[in-house]
């Protein structure tokens, strides 16, 4: 039986530098607060000399995440390889406003890009949403969506712990776990369908 779905609906999937950098900083912070955790999040590094904010880190992170998500959802050209330098003032807020914070921000960007720009970073993350998985999600969504619009999906390598809601109209931030693990698909589809409404 041939499946029919609305042909004007499109999906665009990317793994943005900005949000995955923030995931890295989130996990480094969470690991520093839970040193006894037997299963730390990736990456597990000593950031004690990076000058991360100590007071109000979580509140500041939520603000930075929200702003980065807004910028990504509004402007599909916002995220690129140089975003961490061009919009440095935004991401630098997570570090102390001193020499230690300047050093820490610079080191965190180098640390992130060393991973992200290799085959084991962005390319590997985007490969999780391979043609098969993309086609299945597209068909399942396409059978319910009757609008000629593009749903933009930004993949992040881990689940968000600190931020709140990341969905916007026709835009979603999706952890690769939700794509990779089949039992998560119904929840993923519900989330993506909700994004295809005018939130």
Image (cartoon, grey):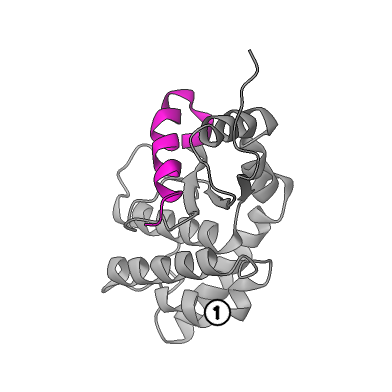
Q: Say left or right for 153 vs 58.
A: right
Q: Which residues are magenta?
A: 178-199
Q: Residue at x 68, y 44 (%)?
A: 120
- Name the residue at the right extreme: 119
Residue 44 in view, yes or no: no
In the rendered image, the vertical position of residue 163 relative to residue 91, given as above or below: above
Q: Is residue 92 magenta?
A: no
Residue 179 x, y percent position in the rendering? 52, 34
Camera-side residue of 52 and 188: 188
Residue 137 x, y percent position in the rendering? 55, 33
Residue 150 x, y percent position in the rendering? 59, 52
Quarter of the image where the C terminus is located: bottom left
In the rendered image, the vertical position of residue 63 relative to residue 141, given as above or below: below
Q: Say left or right for 121 vs 181.
A: right
- For the stretch drawn in magenta, the main secondary structure is helix
Quarter of the image where the N terminus is located: top right
Camera-side residue of 81 and 28: 81
Q: Which residue is mark 1?
A: 88
Q: Residue at x 73, y 46 (%)?
A: 119
Q: Say left or right for 76 vs 156.
A: right
> How many marks can you see?
1
Residue 148 in view, yes or no: yes
Q: Name the image quarter holding residue 61.
A: bottom left
Q: Secondary structure at mark 1?
A: helix
Q: Residue at x 39, y 37 (%)?
A: 190
In the rendered image, the vertical position of residue 168 relative to residue 59, given as above or below: above
Residue 146 x, y percent position in the rendering? 52, 42
Camera-side residue of 178 and 132: 132
In the rendered image, the vertical position of residue 40 relative to residue 139, given as above or below: below
Badge 1 local density, few (<14 within 10 Å), some, or many (20+)? few
- Name the residue at the bottom extreme: 98
Q: Is residue 183 magenta?
A: yes
């Amino acid at each position: 039986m041939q499946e029919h779905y609305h042909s004007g609906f499109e999906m665009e999937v990317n793994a943005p530098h900005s949000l995955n950098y923030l995931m890295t900083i989130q996990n480094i912070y969470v690991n520093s607060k839970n040193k006894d955790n037997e299963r730390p999040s990736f990456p597990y590094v000593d950031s004690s000399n990076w000058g991360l904010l100590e007071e109000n880190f979580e509140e500041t992170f939520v603000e930075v995440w929200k702003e980065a998500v807004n910028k990504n959802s509004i402007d599909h050209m916002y995220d690129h390889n140089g975003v961490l330098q061009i919009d440095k003032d935004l991401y630098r807020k997570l570090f102390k406003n001193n020499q230690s914070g300047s050093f820490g921000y610079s080191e965190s960007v180098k640390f992130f890009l060393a991973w992200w720009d290799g085959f084991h970073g962005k390319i590997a993350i985007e490969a999780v949403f391979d043609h098969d998985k993309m086609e299945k999600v597209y068909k399942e969504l396409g059978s319910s969506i009757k609008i000629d619009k593009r749903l933009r999906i930004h993949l992040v390598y881990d689940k968000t712990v600190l931020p709140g809601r990341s969905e916007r109209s026709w835009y979603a931030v999706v952890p690769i776990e939700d794509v990779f693990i089949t039992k998560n698909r119904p929840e993923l589809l519900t989330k993506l369908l909700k994004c295809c409404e005018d939130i």
